[in-house]
Each structure stands twice: as structure tokens, then as C-alpha cells.
Image (cartoon, helix red, strand yellow):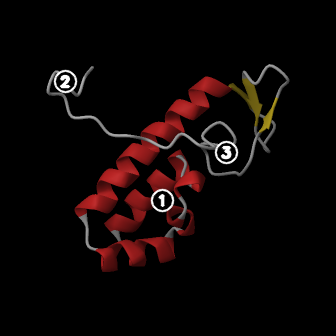
């Protein structure tokens, strides 16, 4: 509906957003109801909150990727390897990307 009203929309691949920790620490354990995620650090968060961080980060990573040259993007991927696979991008990837852009 937003598209028909003239709003700009972006499609996001949400695959693995709830399986990966937004802090970049790797995969998380999910409980049977799939509503809680336990990080490798032992912290427990509501899984929907975690997914929204990762989905938002992927949106902005994609926007940055579209705005720079392929050569620059490859240089950034060398600094932040998880940028090479969208399904592995998390909030931590976005933070690392911003740090790499500043250097």
C-alpha cells in the first residue's frame, strides 16, 4: 500500500535475522516457542527485538552499498568480511561498516 501512496519502499531479506546475534557474537539459541534468544554471552533477549535490529541494519548496509563504487565496496568487505553475505549481516556489521568508512 505504501508504494501506491508514493512512499519509497525497500525489500529486505529477513532470512537468519533471528538466528544471528545483533552484537556479532554469532548464532543464538532459541527456546521452543522461538520468542527468546540466548546469546553466547549468556544474555537473553526477546527474539523479535533482535530481528528488528538486524533487519534495520541490513537496510542501511544495502543503502550504503548502493551509494559507493564496487571497488570501494570490495575494500570494505575486506575490512568487514560478514558484509559479503546478506544473511550474515547484523547490527554489529553495520557498526563495523561505519567504523571502516571513517578510516
Q: Position of residue 28 (x, y in %)?
A: 76, 41
Which of the two discs, 3 and 2, sits closer to the camera?
2
- The numbered mark, 1 or 2, whose residue comes first in the sequence reads 2
Q: Secondary structure at mark 1?
A: helix
Residue indicated by mark 3: 20
Please tell me whether residue 82 is drawn above or below residue 37 in the rendered image. below
Q: CA distance from mark 1 to mark 2?
A: 35 Å
- Within-10-Å neighbours for mark 2: few <14, some 14–19, many 20+: few
Label annotation for residue 25: none
Q: Residue furthest left?
A: 6
Nearest to viewer (mark 1 / mark 2) = 2
Q: Residue at 71% x, 51% y: name it.
A: 26
Helix, strand or loop for disc 3: loop
- Looking at the image, is 99 positioned above or below residue 95? below
Q: Taking 98 as reference, is 50 above or below it?
A: above
Q: Which residue is mark 1?
A: 96
Location of residue 74 in the rendering, given as x and y in whole percent from the top left corner = 41, 77
Q: Is residue 17 left or right of residue 30?
A: left
- Image quadrant in which you'd find residue 41: top right
Q: Nearer the viewer, mark 3 or mark 1?
A: 3
Which label was assigned to residue 4? 2
Determine whether, in the image, residue 63 is placed left or right of residue 49: left
Residue appearing at x 21%, y 34% in the figure: 8
Q: CA distance from mark 3 to mark 1?
A: 16 Å
**Does residue 38 sit above or below 63 in this rendering?**
above
Rounded to the nearest angstrom, the CA distance separating label 3 from label 2 is: 33 Å
SS for callout 2: loop
Mark toward the start of the polypeptide (3 vs 2):
2
Q: Earlier in the sequence, mark 3 or mark 1?
A: 3
Amino acid at each position: 500500500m505504501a508504494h501506491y501512496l508514493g512512499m519509497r519502499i525497500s525489500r529486505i531479506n529477513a532470512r537468519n535475522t533471528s538466528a544471528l546475534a545483533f552484537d556479532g557474537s554469532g548464532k543464538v539459541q532459541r527456546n521452543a516457542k522461538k520468542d527468546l534468544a540466548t546469546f553466547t554471552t549468556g544474555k537473553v533477549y526477546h527474539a523479535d527485538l533482535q530481528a528488528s535490529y538486524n533487519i534495520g541494519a541490513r537496510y542501511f548496509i544495502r543503502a550504503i552499498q548502493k551509494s559507493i563504487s564496487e571497488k570501494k565496496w570490495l575494500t570494505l568487505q575486506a575490512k568487514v568480511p560478514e558484509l559479503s553475505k546478506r544473511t550474515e549481516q547484523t547490527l554489529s556489521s553495520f557498526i563495523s561498516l561505519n567504523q571502516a568508512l571513517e578510516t
